[in-house]
Image: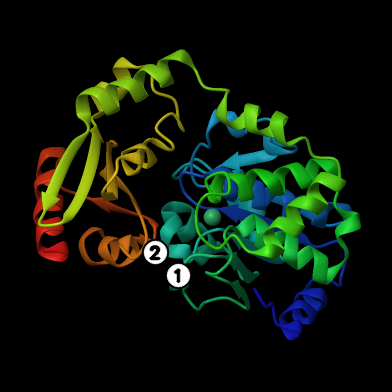
């Protein structure tokens, strides 16, 4: 990943005046990379004397709440967030972390568009970013936004200014977005950054346990139910796909908490021959769709074509305003049409 020097210098200029009011925004349904990159970048800006506010559109998973500073994150809720609207209106700079378009964050995006004249800076690794930013760090070849943040810090300052807490936040983003170093874009630079994070004092087994071994028993039972009862396989010629669906009622029956179904979509890909996996989760407003794939199977394009979504080639998401059964029927037809 080559970050152009003129962008780093432009960022340096934007941050020159201190203190500035800075708002850091993560994406909807925040994951380890959204929270990790936000807390790491915000932690650096705070250490440089800026006033930093952290906002995400909705709740983040409980297994990320231990990350240093996560207790300061505001959850933006429709129309009830006057205090956050004021912070947004007062912002000099807004950093958008780990998502490619303000339109993706709905009510929070509308608040930013209508209340704020702040300069916007994108730090992200998703494909097809929007263009309404003063400065864009958009690098789809980066395995995570957190690794991108690490690289920006190393060019803008020096990695020695990274505290152990900030190093932990960066590692959470790297670890979760690479599937514990098993997905694509695993470059030598990435492993060098991890070596540096270890030097800075992170404890990898501890972080692994906090993120992956901190679930409730209900969550593990829900996983068993999703795989044992709800997983379905589809075959179209040589092409094999699998999907899981969970209704609101099924989630309620398992005392569902935000984040509980995180990672479920990856399991069907462990079946030999399956190269696409989908997960359908019912919410009050729509059906949320997560897609994962292997190799050349491009779920970014598939999500864009059929589910108003996108993301990365092997990991994408989308949504459907149809009912759950109707959405699944539509998905099956889409698979037949697209992969025949
Ligand atoms: Mn990410």
Q: Quadrant of the C terminus?
A: bottom left
Which residue is labeled 1 in the image?
127
Q: Nearer the viewer, residue 298 or 84?
A: 298
Which residue is labeled 2 in the image?
313
In space, the residues marked 2 and 1 are separated at their CA atoms by 9 Å
Image x and y of residue 104, in percent: 42, 59
Would residue 132 be visible to someone looking at this image? yes
Image x and y of residue 45, in percent: 81, 57
Looking at the image, how many numbered discs can be counted on the residues?
2
> Mark 2 or mark 1, which has the lower sequence index?
1
**Badge 1: residue crowd in 10 Å (few <14, some 14–19, many ≥20):** some
User: Where on the picture, by quarter, is residue 25?
Assistant: bottom right
Q: Circles 2 and 1: CB distance less than 8 Å?
A: yes
Q: Is residue 280 left or right of residue 86?
A: left
Q: Quadrant of the N terminus?
A: bottom right
Image x and y of residue 266, in percent: 38, 41
Q: Is residue 17 left or right of residue 223?
A: right
Q: Residue at x 35, y 40 (%)?
A: 270
Image x and y of residue 136, in percent: 61, 75
Would residue 91 be visible to someone looking at this image? no
């Amino acid at each position: 990943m080559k970050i152009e020097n003129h962008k780093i210098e432009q960022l340096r200029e934007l941050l020159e005046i201190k203190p500035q009011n800075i708002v850091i925004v993560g994406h909807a349904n925040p994951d380890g990379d959204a929270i990790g990159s936000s807390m790491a970048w915000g932690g650096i800006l705070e250490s440089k004397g800026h006033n930093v506010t952290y906002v995400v559109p909705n709740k983040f998973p409980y297994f990320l709440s231990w990350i240093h500073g996560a207790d300061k994150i505001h959850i933006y809720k429709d129309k009830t967030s006057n205090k956050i609207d004021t912070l947004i209106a007062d912002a000099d700079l807004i950093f958008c972390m780990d998502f490619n378009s303000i339109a993706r964050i709905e009510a929070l995006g509308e608040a930013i568009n209508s209340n704020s004249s702040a300069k916007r800076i994108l730090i992200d690794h998703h494909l097809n970013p929007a263009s309404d930013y003063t400065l864009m760090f958009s690098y789809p070849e980066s395995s995570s936004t957190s690794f991108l943040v690490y690289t920006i810090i190393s060019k803008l300052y020096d990695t020695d200014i990274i505290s152990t807490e900030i190093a932990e936040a960066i590692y959470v983003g790297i670890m979760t977005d690479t599937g514990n170093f098993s997905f694509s874009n695993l470059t030598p630079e990435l492993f060098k950054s991890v070596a540096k994070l270890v030097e800075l004092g992170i404890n990898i087994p501890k972080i692994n346990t906090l993120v992956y071994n901190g679930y409730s028993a209900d969550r593990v039972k829900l996983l068993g139910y999703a795989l044992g009862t709800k997983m379905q396989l589809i075959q179209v010629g040589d092409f094999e796909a699998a999907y899981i669906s969970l209704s609101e009622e099924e989630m309620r029956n398992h005392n569902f908490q935000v984040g509980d179904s995180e990672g479920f979509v990856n399991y069907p890909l462990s079946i030999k021959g399956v190269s696409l996996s989908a997960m359908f989760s019912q919410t009050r407003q729509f059906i949320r769709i997560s897609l994962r794939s292997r190799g050349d199977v491009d779920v970014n394009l598939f999500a864009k074509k059929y589910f108003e979504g996108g993301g990365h080639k092997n990991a994408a998401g989308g949504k459907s305003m149809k009912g759950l059964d109707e959405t699944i029927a539509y998905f099956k037809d889409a698979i037949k049409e697209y992969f025949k």
